[in-house]
Image (cartoon, rainbow, N blue to C red):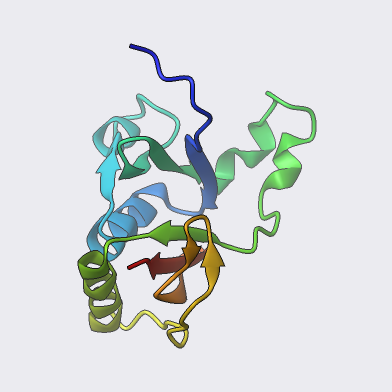
Amino acid sequence: MTDNTTRLDHVVLWVRDPLAAAHFYENTVGLEAVRVAEFAAGEVPFPSVRVNDEALLDLMPLSTAEHMTVLPGAADSAGHPVNHICLALPQTAFDALIARLGDRSVPVSDVSHGSFGARGKATRSFYFRDPDGNVIEARHYD
């Protein structure tokens, strides 16, 4: 059966070192890294991390920006400011993430309460940066 509901499929993040980024997202954030071995072997252009069964973060090497020809001007998107991406987690995963970030001395913002998102007001949320400076928000809903 084909489900034709509109969904977010992936977000592409420019990163300096895709293997280091995959390691951070897998070991610190807790997302499953995919295509890492294939990327390391030169078989695919970038690795990804799986947000859930339906969405990925693609970790695009910043060094490839000048070769982007799919869309005129695509190379200009390298370093283009995106405010942040948000990961909605179950409460236990949220608590585990904030603990792992602390264990690894990754700075985090204060925890806020009641910020608006796709499912209404979040119970708690906070922000942190990945090693490339991309801002990530983590939140959970009751």
Report whether residue 61 is seen: yes
Res. 133 in view: no
Q: Nearer the viewer, residue 35 or 95?
A: 95
| Quarter of image, res 21 | bottom left
The percent position of residue 49, horizontal first and vertical second, equals 34, 45
Which residue sits at x=32%, y=60%?
89
Point out residue 68 in the picture as x, y percentages from the top left corner: 66, 31
How many marks overall?
0
Residue 139 or 122: which is nearer the viewer? 122
The relative height of residue 121 versus residue 69 in the rendered view (above or below) is: below
Quadrant of the rendering where the C terminus is positioned: bottom left
Q: Position of residue 22 (x, y in %)?
A: 33, 51
Residue at 27% in and 66% down? 28
Q: Residue at x 34, y 34 (%)?
A: 39
Q: Which image quadrant for residue 56? A: top left
| Residue projecting furthest to the bottom | 110
- Closer to the camera in the image, 118 or 11: 118
Near-viewer residue (3 or 25) = 3
What's the residue at 79%, 35% (across, down)?
73
Q: Left or right of 70: which side holds 22?
A: left
Q: Which corner quadrant of the image does residue 74 belong to?
A: top right
Q: Tell me where residue 46 appears, x and y as whole percent.
A: 43, 36
State which quarter of the image contains the N terminus: top left
* Residue at the extreme right of the image, as rendered: 72
**Horizontal side, residue 90 vs residue 77: left or right:** left
